[in-house]
Amino acid sequence: MPQDADHHQAQPTLDQAARQIRSYGLTADPQAVLVAVRLMATGARLGQATEVHFGRFGLSTGRYRLLADLEDCGGEKSPSQLAAGLGVSRATVTGLVDGLEREGLVARRSSREDGRATVVVLTARGAQRLRDMAPEHFRRLESMVGGLTEAELGTFLELLDRITRGIGALVEE
């Protein structure tokens, strides 16, 4: 498992967080601030690594997520359902679908329930792309967290859920 040897050196420390908080005359918890800062940095690094990972399969993270979402729901969704499920705008979904459609991985068609509405459908080629990439994709995901025990994985999932619920603090007015 190759790892970035100097990634720990670039990480902020508890002492640095405490000094910065004091320099602003604040009373924030340095450990809480450090966890949040490191989580944001890890998220950025993970986002970059994810793009490289999916690039191996001729996809972007967004395109993969859209294909996987379609597969998970039986192969068909409206653009607005895709946008809601992926947490992106309709315009973003339109761009993703346009690219995937050019590659023959998805198709647009009229909805069976409402002929005026359009749905996005996972094509056989799209489903095959997901099947072809699955062994390597899941092996790499498992390897990424392979240093954690089963108990740690469970705890990590619980912690991620709690942190995810707190993300709104960054964007609320």
Image (cartoon, rainbow, N blue to C red):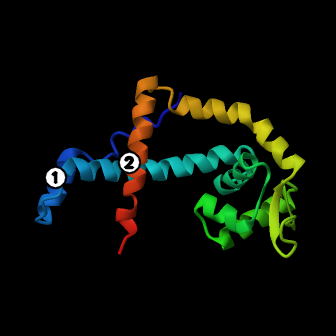
What residue do we see at 62% from left, 58% from top? 85
Q: Position of residue 146 (x, y in %)?
A: 51, 26
Pointer 2: residues within 10 angstroms few (<14), some, or many (20+)? few
Query: Would residue 125 appear left or right of 41 to someone viewing this image?
Result: right
Pointer 1: residues within 10 angstroms few (<14), some, or many (20+)? some
Q: Position of residue 120 (x, y in %)?
A: 80, 61
The quadrant of the rendering that contains the C terminus is bottom left
The amino acid sitting under disc 2 is Arg
Q: Position of residue 115 (x, y in %)?
A: 88, 72
Q: Which mark is residue 162?
A: 2
**Comparing marks 1 and 2, which lies closer to the viewer?**
2
Query: Would residue 76 appear left or right of 26 to someone viewing this image?
Result: right
| Count of picture labels | 2
Mark 1–mark 2 Cα distance, whole angstroms, equals 24 Å
- Circle 1 residue: 18
Res 97 → quadrant: bottom right
Choose between 129 and 5: the one closer to the eye: 129
What residue do we see at 62% from left, 63% from top? 84
